[in-house]
Amino acid sequence: MSLNSYANDFDLYRAWAKLVIHDEFDPPTQKYAAGAAFFRGQGNGQVVRVEGVDEAQKEIGHLVVEARLPRPGQRRSSSYEGEGYAIVRHPDTAVVQDALHRMVRRIRVITA
């Protein structure tokens, strides 16, 4: 629901509660395109390091609205979401798509 909240500049959690309690929902107008990149290490073990974060920050950091980066020592996740993520948003869908492509090409989670 966070991704939808960012895309609509809208608190979807609050709207859901209002819908459940008062049976009221005022749909927002979408203001942004938003997307998430998930960071996943290859192999087994623990996260040793994360590469490319500084470069990605310089290139597209201004678009990031939420992130949880993998930490060295963190056990490799069994979830499809991996060890971390970043959410980006911008009014132009092409800008969001480019930012996501840059992140997944640039950021590498090294596990051992």
Image (cartoon, rainbow, N blue to C red):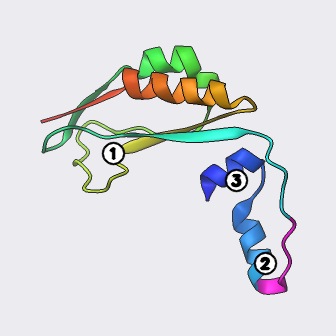
What numbered label is drawn on residue 6? none
> Is 76 placed above or below 109 here?
below
- 84 left or right of 87 in image: left
Asked if disc 3 and disc 2 are in contact, CB closer than 8 Å, the reply is no
Mark closer to the observer (2, 1): 2
How many numbered marks have been drawn onto this rendered protein structure?
3
> Is 96 placed above or below 66 here?
above
- 33 left or right of 76 in image: right
Q: Residues within 10 Å of mark 2 (few under 14, many from 20)?
A: few
What numbered label is drawn on residue 5? 3
11 in the magenta segment: no
- Which residue does the image show at 69% across and 66% down from the upper left? 13
**Residue 53 percent across, percent down from the top left:** 42, 23
- Which residue does the image show at 48% across and 19% down from the upper left? 56
Residue ID for mark 2: 19
The local secondary structure at tag 1 comes to loop
**Sequence-wise, which precedes: disc 2 or disc 1?**
2
> Is 35 placed above or below 75 here?
above
**Residue 32 percent across, percent down from the top left:** 74, 39
- 65 left or right of 104 in image: right
Magenta-tinted stretch: 21-26
> Is 109 placed above or below 31 here?
above
* Residue 63 seen in this snapshot: no
By secondary structure, the bulk of the magenta-drawn segment is best described as loop
Give the CA separation, mark 3 to mark 2: 15 Å
**Sequence-wise, which precedes: disc 3 or disc 2?**
3
Asked if disc 3 and disc 1 are in contact, CB closer than 8 Å, the reply is no
Q: What kind of residue is marked 1? A: Glu
Residue ID for mark 1: 83
